[in-house]
């Protein structure tokens, strides 16, 4: 009986659970050793929107597409009308705007932390331009990831770079409108191997706080070591009112970009549990996003799989009997408290989700519906020639 009631509550919350998908998840991306080009990969922004619309039709919970400025709007603000046309045509919103601060030659020694003031200015201008793109497209989030760091001890002044970053983020923050948020992402290593300028949640928290009230931290689940307790980091960020959003993906080592829940679904469940424990009704204020680019699996297929995994794990977290859990914790009934959590995790929510989808006119089994739709075969035919002309090489 208790499970039944909780399941109904879970289903109500599911109505407010959405997850954003990344444009780069549909493009030819891969490891730094090379890419395995896919016939059906998107090579234009329109194709990325078309793929996103397909995922939305199949899952019903991916209303927006995160955009990377230089990849998706190479002409910046001049590309905004085209994005608006695609938003209209495909019924998918423009999501978080990601400035691209890592691929230009000037950024070899950093972007916002570059020792050359001229290059830092150029990087700030790019982010300010990205904020304007976000305003023009009515996007709430500017999502910042820096590749900045250094490879050798002594090569750079870590402390000068902290100061430059504080200055840059404060200036960028001033350009935000009231409704906008600057998300500051952290990552321990790669591409830099000695020090990374925003290496962990402590640094990201400080930088968000010093930038201003419109800045928050973005947690990319792939940017952690196995030994780190991500849900504890999430709990702290919520405690500090600094949690802005997530880039979800799974990893065995670090930043592997694997399908969500493919390695450690229990961890994603624990993260959702921590969020629901604090923000029962307000979780919708957190930006849930995927950040994955698949080199082996089909891109639309892998995206649908990840979206379903996110929804399943969120639903499971909704099933935790928190009142009971709190009582067991107070009474230090350790094994029973753990079982209380585990029993929610091991509840099979798939039949309930199938019903939930059916009631909304969404296919009961989105992956199967994708296979039966012939969409992938169709785009492979349409896009094969363009993809065949591309080169993939490491050297
Ligand atoms: C690179 O590590 C990365 O995966 C970061 O997580 C960013 O969010 C993403 O690329 C897009 O720039
Ligand atoms: Mn990320």
Image (tube, rainbow, N blue to C red):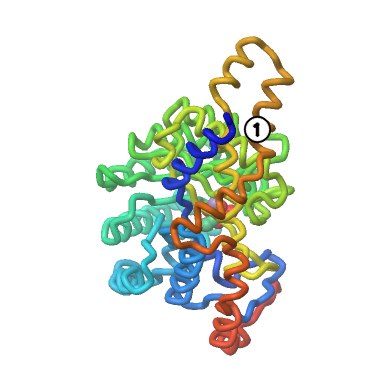
Q: Residue at x 37, y 55 (%)?
A: 127
Q: Residue at x 38, y 43 (%)?
A: 169
Position of 310 relative to 278 (above/below): below
Residue furthest to the bottom in view is 385
Q: Residue at x 66, y 77 (%)?
A: 392
Q: Is residue 265 left or right of residue 108?
A: right
Q: Is residue 140 left or right of residue 377?
A: left
Q: Residue 360: percent from the left, percent from the top? A: 44, 58
Who is closer to the viewer here, 344 or 188? Answer: 344
- Splitting the image into 4 quarters, where does residue 125 fall? bottom left
Who is closer to the viewer here, 56 or 100? Answer: 56
Quadrant of the frame with the C terminus: bottom right
| Residue named by callout 1 | 229
Q: Residue 375: percent from the left, percent from the top? A: 55, 78
Image quarter for ligand 1 equals bottom right
Q: Residue 98: percent from the left, percent from the top? A: 43, 57
Q: Residue 357: percent from the left, percent from the top? A: 50, 56
Q: Residue at x 62, y 67 (%)?
A: 368
Residue 163 visible within the image: no
Residue 311 visible within the image: yes
Disc 1, SS: loop
């Amino acid at each position: 009986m208790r499970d039944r009631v909780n399941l109904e509550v879970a289903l109500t919350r599911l109505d407010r659970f959405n997850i954003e998908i990344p444009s780069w998840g549909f493009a030819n991306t891969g490891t730094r050793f090379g890419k395995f080009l896919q016939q059906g990969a998107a090579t234009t922004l329109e194709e990325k929107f078309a793929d996103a619309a397909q995922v939305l039709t199949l899952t019903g919970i991916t209303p927006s597409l995160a955009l990377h400025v230089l990849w998706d709007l190479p002409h910046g603000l001049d590309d905004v009308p085209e994005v608006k046309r695609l938003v209209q045509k495909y019924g998918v919103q423009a999501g978080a705007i990601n400035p691209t601060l890592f691929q230009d030659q000037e950024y070899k020694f950093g972007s916002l932390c570059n020792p050359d003031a001229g290059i830092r200015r150029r990087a700030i201008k790019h982010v300010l331009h990205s904020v304007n793109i976000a305003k023009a497209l009515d996007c709430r989030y500017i999502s910042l990831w820096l590749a900045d760091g250094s490879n050798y001890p002594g090569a750079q002044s870590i402390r000068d770079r902290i100061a430059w970053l504080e200055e840059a983020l404060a200036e960028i923050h001033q350009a935000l409108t009231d409704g906008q948020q600057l998300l500051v992402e952290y990552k321990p290593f790669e591409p830099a191997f000695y020090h990374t300028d925003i290496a962990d949640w402590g640094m990201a928290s400080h930088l968000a706080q010093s930038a201003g009230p419109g800045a928050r931290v973005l947690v990319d689940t792939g940017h952690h070591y196995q030994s780190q307790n991500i849900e504890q980091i999430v709990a702290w960020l919520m405690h500090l009112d600094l949690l802005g959003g997530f880039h979800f993906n799974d990893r065995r080592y670090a930043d592997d970009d694997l399908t969500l829940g493919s390695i450690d679904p229990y961890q994603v469940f624990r993260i959702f549990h921590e969020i629901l424990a604090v923000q029962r009704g307000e979780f919708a204020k957190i930006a849930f996003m995927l950040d994955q680019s698949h080199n082996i699996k089909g891109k639309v297929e892998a995206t649908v799989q990840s979206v379903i995994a996110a929804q399943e794990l969120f639903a499971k977290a909704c099933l935790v009997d928190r009142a009971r859990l709190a009582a067991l914790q107070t009474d230090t009934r350790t094994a029973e408290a753990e079982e209380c959590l585990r029993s929610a995790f091991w509840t099979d929510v798939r039949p309930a989700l199938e019903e939930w989808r059916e009631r909304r006119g969404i296919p009961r089994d989105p992956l199967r519906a994708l296979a039966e739709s012939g969409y992938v075969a169709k785009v492979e035919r349409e896009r094969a020639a363009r993809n065949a002309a591309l080169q993939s090489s490491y050297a």
